[in-house]
Image (spheres, helix red, strand yellow):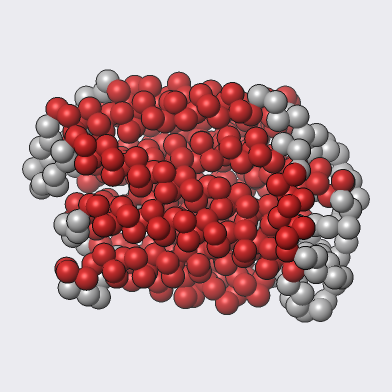
Amino acid sequence: MRAHPMVYSLGNLGTNIFAQAFATFALFFYVDHLRAALGPITFALGVQSVWHAVLNPLIGVLSDRTRTRWGRRLPYIAGGTIPLGLVFFLLWHPLVPHNALVGYFFILVVLFDALYLVVVINWTSLFPELFTTLEDRAYAARWRQFVGILGLMIGVALPPLLYGHWGWTIMGAILAVIGTGGFLAVLVSHGPMRTMTPQKPAPWLPLVRKSLRQPGFIRYLTANFLIQFVLLLIPGVMPFYGKYVLHLRHSQLTILLAATFGTALLVLYPWSWMIRRVGTQKSFRLAMILLGIAVVPFGIIHHFIGGLLTMVGIGIGLGGFLTLVDIVMAELIDDQARRHPDLRKEGTFYGINGFVLRLGTTLEAAVIYEVLHVTGYHPNSEGLASASVLWGLRWLMGGAPLLAIILAILVFRRFGIPESPRHVIAPLAPERNG
């Protein structure tokens, strides 16, 4: 039985709520709210990002080599979901005194990363196996990103209202329950989503080596790294930018962030239509171009309306990128499977991709720290900042993202991997029980 895209897509609630709430508000929570030292916290983020990066391919390869009666992916999702939700909650409810915050933060994010990767890599790796044609993938990607953007809105736009009204602990509890519920809903419907299991696990080193040698994979990794860096940097800096540059209230920050994801939600269908009309790779380039145009106004806007219009513009490109990024990855996996029909290694591809993307978090933390440190940032409840700090925040929101997007467009120009077939092809082999 085939999996319905809606059932599969529920996992994107947890994926995006957990990742985006952490990326957007963790630094702000610990540095600006709890007043932990900026340097040690950003250093902990950098170390944690390296840990996350190393774990990605290891967990991906382990998943590909796993053989159980429930398949390769589902046991990991089942075992990691509840602990992941608990650790996420504890990030927003520190159990230690102020002088131990840095150590507490470091330990919690190491645990959070490990559990998050165990669950999310295995959930993500189901996509290329379950949906095999361009029509199926475009349809499934639209469902996936519809749910995913709801997760983004909950994880990024909702928190200012929650912590502004009830505090950070209640915010963490609400997000943990919703995110965990998304993965549990996938498990409840696990029967239709069993995927094929290799008869004999392949050695891990050849899996990684063949993946890296796959034509187009390095270009995809580089372009995806640069765009994901932008999508980490903008929400990560937005609480600072909204407070010190635009002087926004909590409710206005929520509206600004919600406008981005609401717009992305509205454009999912037009992007899906465009993918079917012109193909994935032209659409992918267009999405990157639109994102580049959209970030420029961050260098000059001074008020809420300007911020709102800018975030709407970002939402248009974001909707396209979110719809396309997994389709392009699936095309890489398909091309590799045609070259080596004895292997299906979705987990390895997604693990290597996650390794590279996590380095973007390291870069994000380093860039934010360097700019805030050099410009003389000091947290205060009044939202007052020097001219140098304001310039630094504008560079973080506009200049650095534009540079990264231009590089991504240039790298992706010669991608050249065959696109997904537009009509039905032979289905994957059914699940072989262990």
333, above or below 195, in the image: above
Q: Position of residue 281 (x, y in %)?
A: 69, 29
Does residue 430 appear in this view? yes
Measuring 75% from the left and 57% from the top, which residue is drawn there? 207
Does residue 274 appear in this view? no
Q: Position of residue 371 (x, y in %)?
A: 27, 37
120, above or below 416, in the image: below
> In this rendering, would 77 be left or right of 276?
left
Measuring 45% from the left and 21% from the top, which residue is drawn there? 293
Q: Quadrant of the N terminus?
A: bottom right
Count every numbered label the image shows and give the total: 0
> In this rendering, would 287 be left or right of 392?
right
Can you tell which quarter of the image residue 18 is in?
bottom left
Measuring 23% from the left and 40% from the top, which residue is drawn there? 372
> In this rendering, would 61 be left or right of 361?
right
Q: Quadrant of the C terminus?
A: bottom right
Between residue 237 and residue 170, name the one nearer to us.
237
254, above or below 180, in the image: above
Measuring 65% from the left and 61% from the top, which residue is drawn there? 60
Q: Position of residue 344 (x, y in %)?
A: 80, 57
Q: Position of residue 326 (x, y in %)?
A: 65, 45
Can you tell which quarter of the image residue 246 is in?
top left
Between residue 199 and residue 305, name the one nearer to us.
199
